[in-house]
Amino acid sequence: MAAFFDRIRTRIVPALLTAIGVALLAGGLLSYTNPATADPLPTATATPIAAVATPSPLITLPPIGSVAPPSPTASIPADRVVTRVRVAALKIDLPVIDQPNVSYPACNVAMYYDDRRLGQPGEGRATYIYAHARTGMFLPILSQSKISGGKKMLGMVVEVWTSDDQRFLYVITAVKRHVPTSSAFVAPFAVTTEQLWLQTSEGVGPMPKLQVVAEFLSQEAAPHAEANPIPKPVNCH
């Protein structure tokens, strides 16, 4: 009897267990290679490496020369005014102010003509600056105009600063002598490009005017103190 139970334990039981396991595997109830999951995940489609898009940069610059320059008034402060003028070759360097509310221009400064038909530097119109033909002011312009019609001034650089700390460079291209006072503003009022006009008198009273015309060269930022000298106008009538 003992031999019979040993035979069941050692041969028949293992054989039955093996048969049951094979049956379960065949039925798909057990798997040693693909464990079951509660919710199958969606099948992901592999994307070839070559098809992966490269992220675009935050800023893309257009090719140089492909975009037109901004209009002259695109970023100009509404309160910009000219504050200083220098012609280094003639040793002229003056603060520039709006003409005081007096009938006669001040001395020790230059003045800009404030008219809606004119402009300030960078506005794409004529900026008009004038001063007396006196020592320390615009006298060197008048003196040079008397020599070969002022040809030596052609090509000279004029620097102009503005209240918003900008420096503009212009180059003198024309000298206009003996301009009647009555028609002095006809030409500058008609300007539609960036220009600078300097004016002084050729004598006392209603004498003809001397005008120097300069074309725009460049613009750059400037130190505040350099661009905004303290004017000290004097009544010199």
Image: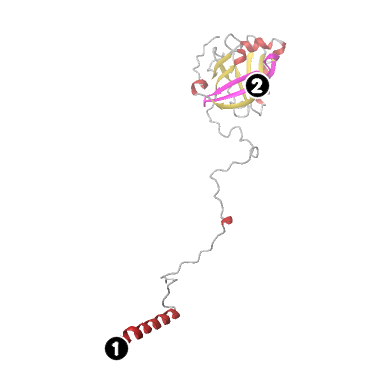
Q: Nearer the viewer, mark 1 or mark 2?
A: 1
Residue type beneath disc 2: Val
Helix, strand or loop status at disc 1: helix
Outermost bottom residue: 1
Query: Contact, CB < 8 Å: mark 1 with mark 2?
Result: no
Query: Range of the magenta residues?
Result: 151-176
Residue 202 appears in the figure: no
Task: From this view, report whether residue 124 is shown above or below residue 230.
Answer: below
Q: Residue drawn 38% across and 84% down?
A: 15
The quarter in which the N terminus is drawn is bottom left
Dot 1, how many residues are within 10 Å of its Cα: few (below 14), some (14-19), or many (20+)? Answer: few
- Name the side, left or right, on which 162 lies relative to 20: right
Q: Residues within 10 Å of mark 2 (few under 14, many from 20)?
A: many
Rendered image quadrant of residue 200: top right
Mark 1: amino acid: Ala
The residue identified by callout 1 is 3
Residue projecting furthest to the front: 3
Q: Which residue is mark 2?
A: 171
